[in-house]
Image (cartoon, rainbow, N blue to C red):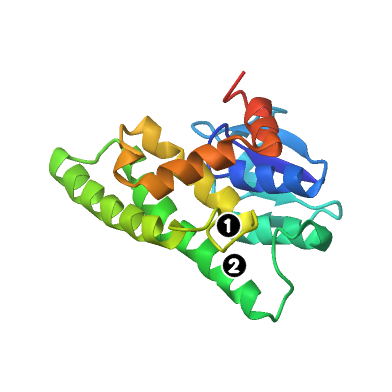
C-alpha cells in the first residue's frame, strides 16, 4: 500500500496508525501547491479532491479521508486493538471520537491555515477552538486516551490535529488534560517513528 502525505498534515494520523499496527507503507510526499507527488505523478489523477491523505491499496483502489483510512488500516490488524470490533458499542464510541476529531477539532483548527482569514474572523475561530478544546479537556479528564485506557486510531487523529496548535500560537496549557495527553502520545515510539520519517523531529 502507498500513503500520499504532506509532512505534519492530517495524513500523519494514518501514518501513525500504520506504524502502530505494524503495517509497512510506501510513502509518497505531495507538493500540495502544485498537486504533484515526489515521484512526479499528477496527484489530482490519484485523488481528485487534491488534499492528503490518499491510500492506494495493493489492488489499485484508492481510499481518502483520514477517519476512513485510519479505520481501514486498523481493521487490517484487529489484534492491534487500534479499533474495536465492528458492531460493538465500543466501535461506535470509536467512530464518535473520530468524528469529533474530524468535524470539531480538525475543521476548526485547520481553518486557521486560510491566508484570507481576517483578524476578526480569526478571533471568532479562536473562540470556537477554545470551546472545542474545553470539551476535549473534559472528555480526557481522568483517562489516558480519548476512549479510555487504550491508544486507538482516534488518538492518532486527535494528536495530529492538536499539534497544529503550536503552529498557530495556541497555548494549550489552559487545558491541562489536553496538554498532558499531547505529551503522552508524543512519547510513543511509533508516533516518534512516523514524525521522524516525515522530517518533523530529528
Determine the residue located farthest toward the right in the rendered image: 59
Structural crowding at the residue carrying mark 1, measured as other residues with C-alpha within 10 Å and reported as few (<14), some (14–19) or many (≥20): many
**Circle 1 is placed at which residue position?**
154
Q: Is residue 96 left or right of residue 61?
A: left
Q: Residue at x 58, y 23 (%)?
A: 201
Q: Residue at x 71, y 49 (%)?
A: 55
Q: Residue at x 34, y 40 (%)?
A: 172
Determine the residue located farthest toward the front in the rendered image: 142
Structural crowding at the residue carrying mark 2, measured as other residues with C-alpha within 10 Å and reported as few (<14), some (14–19) or many (≥20): many
What SS does tag 1 mark? helix
Where residue 173 sits: x, y (%)? 33, 39
Where residue 200 sits: x, y (%)? 57, 25
71 over 51 or under it: above or below: below
**Circle 2 is placed at which residue position?**
94
**Sequence-wise, which precedes: disc 1 or disc 2?**
2
Note whether residue 65 is visible.
no
173 over 135 or under it: above or below: above
What SS does tag 2 mark? helix
3D distance between C-alphas at marks 1 and 2 = 7 Å
Note whether residue 92 is visible.
yes
Marks 2 and 1: in contact by CB < 8 Å? yes
Amino acid at each position: 500500500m502507498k500513503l500520499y502525505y504532506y509532512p505534519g498534515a492530517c495524513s500523519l494520523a494514518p501514518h501513525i496508525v500504520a506504524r502502530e499496527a505494524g503495517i509497512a507503507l510506501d510513502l509518497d510526499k505531495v507538493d500540495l501547491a502544485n498537486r504533484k507527488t515526489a515521484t512526479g505523478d499528477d496527484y489530482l489523477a490519484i485523488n481528485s479532491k487534491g488534499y492528503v491523505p490518499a491510500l492506494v491499496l495493493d489492488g489499485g483502489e484508492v481510499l481518502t479521508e483520514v477517519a476512513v483510512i485510519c479505520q481501514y488500516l486498523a481493521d487490517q490488524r484487529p489484534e492491534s486493538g487500534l479499533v474495536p470490533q465492528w458492531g460493538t458499542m465500543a466501535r461506535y464510541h470509536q467512530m464518535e471520537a473520530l468524528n469529533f476529531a474530524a468535524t470539531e477539532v480538525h475543521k476548526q483548527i485547520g481553518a486557521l491555515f486560510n491566508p484570507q482569514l481576517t483578524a476578526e474572523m480569526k478571533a471568532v475561530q479562536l473562540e470556537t477552538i477554545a470551546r472545542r478544546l474545553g470539551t476535549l479537556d473534559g472528555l480526557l479528564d481522568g483517562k489516558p486516551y480519548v476512549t479510555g485506557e487504550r491508544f486507538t486510531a482516534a488518538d492518532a487523529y486527535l494528536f495530529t490535529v492538536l499539534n497544529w496548535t503550536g503552529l498557530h500560537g495556541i497555548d494549550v496549557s489552559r487545558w491541562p488534560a489536553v496538554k498532558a495527553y499531547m505529551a503522552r502520545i508524543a512519547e510513543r515510539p511509533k508516533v516518534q517513528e512516523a514524525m521522524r520519517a516525515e522530517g518533523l523531529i530529528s
